Amino acid sequence: LRKSGDRAVPEKVAMLEKNVAQAFFNRGQHGEANEYFERVLTFHGVTTPKSRVSMALKFGIDFLRLLSSLYLQFLFWKKVPTQKEKEIQALALKNAQAVSVTDPRLFVFKCIDYISRFTIRFDPVTWDSGPGEVAITSTIFSWSGVSFPLARRIISIARDKIDETDARSMLFCRFSELVVSCASGDWPEDIAFNQDLIDRNLAMGEFFFTTTSFLWNIPRYVARGDFVAVE
């Protein structure tokens, strides 16, 4: 890139930066991954406001759109995404995952932006693991403690659309149920740990949510006194 300078083809630069971002993400270097995810998303027109005022305004509008989509579903969840939109959506989701580790405040903004920009626009069954990705957006409300009923409503909408043979969607949904159970202290909600589901997702290269599933199960088993399961 340094040699090419201004002659570098933007599309090729974006593709290279996408690969670099993915490599950092897979190695757990989320701060470095974020830098490259932001560059690629900016190339595709997905930008983050620079000022706090503009961020707050966009956050408010996006949040209202989310609420509307949950109670006026017939107005949302319709569009069939193009292949390019699917690719941009996948990048934005990875970016939000990485930010969750490095910047909790920005993570909240990124999640609401992701939901408004992608999730509620598209019919979940029209993209890979769509229903599961809908379910996973509930964690922004359960993990933060903002609204457990809202988190459960999102999970309920996603569950109705999940194909149980879709291992990734099933993992995302179970993880979402686990987070709302742990965060709310609603311990009677028994979310069974499914090793087979974990193994199937690991075989597909889904490392982020498989490892975080282990991390969220540990305090649940400790709180129940099930130290055999913890081991």
Image: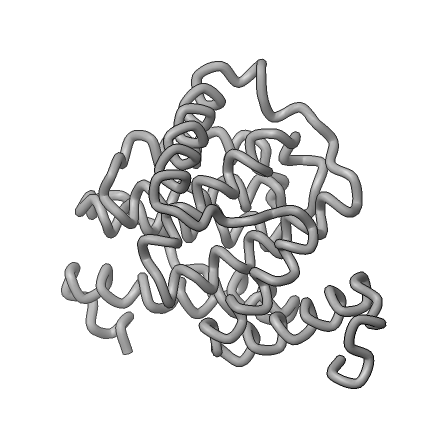
Q: Which quadrant is home to the N terminus?
A: bottom right
Residue at the image point whose x is 51% and y is 65% from the top: 198
Q: Nearer the viewer, residue 109 or 11?
A: 11
Residue at the image point whose x is 29% and y is 30% from the top: 149
Residue at the image point whose x is 40% and y is 65% from the top: 212
Q: Position of residue 60 (x, y in %)?
A: 37, 30
Up-down: is 79 above or below 34?
Answer: above
Spot the residue most to the bottom.
3
Q: Position of residue 173 (x, y in %)?
A: 47, 46
Q: Which quadrant is home to the C terminus?
A: bottom left
Up-down: is 114 above or below 87?
Answer: above
- In-image side of 164 versus 101 (left or right): right
Total marks in image:
0
Spot the residue most to the front.
6
- In-image side of 186 versus 41 (left or right): left
- In-image side of 31 versus 17 (left or right): left
Up-down: is 127 above or below 96?
Answer: above
The chosen color scheme is: one colour
Residue at the image point whose x is 31% and y is 62% from the top: 216
Q: Nearer the viewer, residue 53 or 173?
A: 53
Residue 69 shows in the view: yes
Residue 199 shows in the view: no
Q: Position of residue 52 (x, y in %)?
A: 34, 45
Q: Position of residue 108 (x, y in %)?
A: 37, 48
For residue 17, what is the image quadrant? bottom right
